[in-house]
Image (cartoon, rainbow, N blue to C red):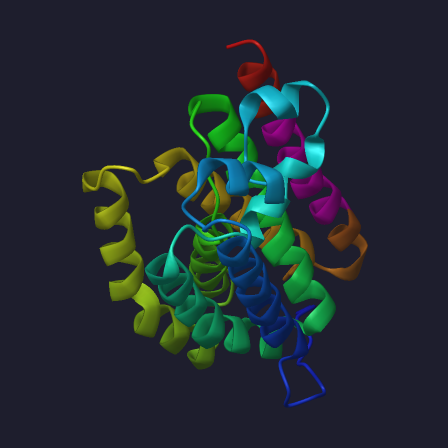
């Protein structure tokens, strides 16, 4: 039984909302001293390990909406616009937002576990969206639309992975953590199992996600 639900509206409200929020935050940071200014980034909610350890756990989510420089905002914004519209149509607005946020949190907690530097950006969620596309193609091999979507974004996914591996200043752990979070979140909300097994499958992937978050947080807190 397929649990994917089409968005009844043709307007991707969540995708547009995310883009508007990211743009507003960028403009505010520029006004307050620049989006590449470390003090401004910290003030607006970038990932700072020491502050997370002190209890500012919201910094595992807020970095998703912050970007360092205009080119960072534009590149991530394009990915969110094109891929986000597709995924919001497939999952519906609420489920898409859930996938986006869970991937972002997973990416930031993975970064917290391995990277001591200040970081920000929606790349964690974007890699989660990439993982969602690949997961859909795997779970539904007989659905031509999902296969086409995976084919269309495959080159972009490969380019982003290579860019992450060979570019300095890229939070690789955040990207791969986001991909893991996106995959697990996707498996939480889709299922081809019989109705009586769907709840078990969903709880299984929720458990995997929670365990991943706890392990990363424990490692980061004790580094």
The chief SS type of the magenta part is helix
Decide if residue 181 is on the left or right side of residue 210: left
Front-most of 154 and 20?
20
Residue 79 forms part of the magenta stretch:
no
Q: Quadrant of residue 54?
A: top right
Residue 195 or residue 132, whichever sits in front: 132
Q: Is any atom of residue 127 visible in this view? A: yes
**Residue at 52% across, 27% down:** 112
Residue at left 46%, top 36%? 38
| Residue farthest top in this picture | 222
Q: How many marks?
A: 0
- Residue at 59% of width from left, 30% of height from top? 212
- Name the outermost residue toward the left: 166
Measuring 62% from the left and 46% from the top, which residue is drawn there?
62
- Judged left or right of residue 98, residue 220 is left
Q: Estimate the x, y position of residue 174 in percent, counting from the top left.
A: 44, 38
Answer with the quarter of the image where residue 173 lies: top left
Q: Position of residue 198 (x, y in %)?
A: 74, 54
In the foreground, 100 or 133: 100
Residue 182 point in image, percent of width and height? 54, 50
Does 221 sit above or below residue 214? above
Q: Viewer-proximal residue, 61 or 165?
A: 61
Asked whether residue 184 appears in the rendered view, the answer is: no
Residue 63: percent from the left, percent from the top? 56, 45
> Is the residue 119 above or below the residue 64 in the image?
above
Q: Report the span colored magenta.
A: 200-214
Q: Quadrant of the N terminus?
A: bottom right
């Amino acid at each position: 039984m397929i649990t994917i639900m089409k968005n009844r509206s043709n307007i991707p409200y969540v995708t547009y909302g995310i883009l508007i929020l990211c743009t507003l935050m960028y403009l505010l940071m520029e006004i307050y001293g620049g989006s590449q200014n470390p003090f401004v980034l910290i003030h607006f909610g970038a990932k700072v390990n020491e502050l997370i350890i002190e209890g500012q756990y919201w910094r595992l989510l807020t970095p998703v909406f912050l970007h360092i420089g205009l080119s960072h905002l534009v590149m991530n914004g394009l990915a969110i616009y094109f891929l986000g519209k597709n995924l919001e149509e497939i999952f519906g607005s609420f489920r898409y937002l859930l996938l986006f946020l869970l991937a972002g949190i997973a990416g930031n907690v993975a970064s917290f576990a391995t990277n001591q530097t200040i970081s920000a950006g929606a790349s964690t969620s974007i890699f989660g969206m990439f993982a969602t596309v690949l997961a859909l193609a795997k779970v539904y091999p007989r659905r031509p639309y999902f296969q086409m979507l995976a084919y269309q974004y495959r080159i972009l996914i490969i380019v982003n992975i290579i860019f992450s591996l060979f570019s300095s200043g890229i939070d690789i752990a955040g990207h791969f953590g986001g991909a893991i979070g996106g995959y697990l979140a996707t498996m939480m909300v889709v299922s081809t199992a019989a109705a009586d097994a769907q709840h078990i499958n969903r709880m299984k992937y929720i458990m995997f996600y929670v365990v991943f978050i706890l392990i990363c947080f424990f490692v980061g807190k004790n580094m």
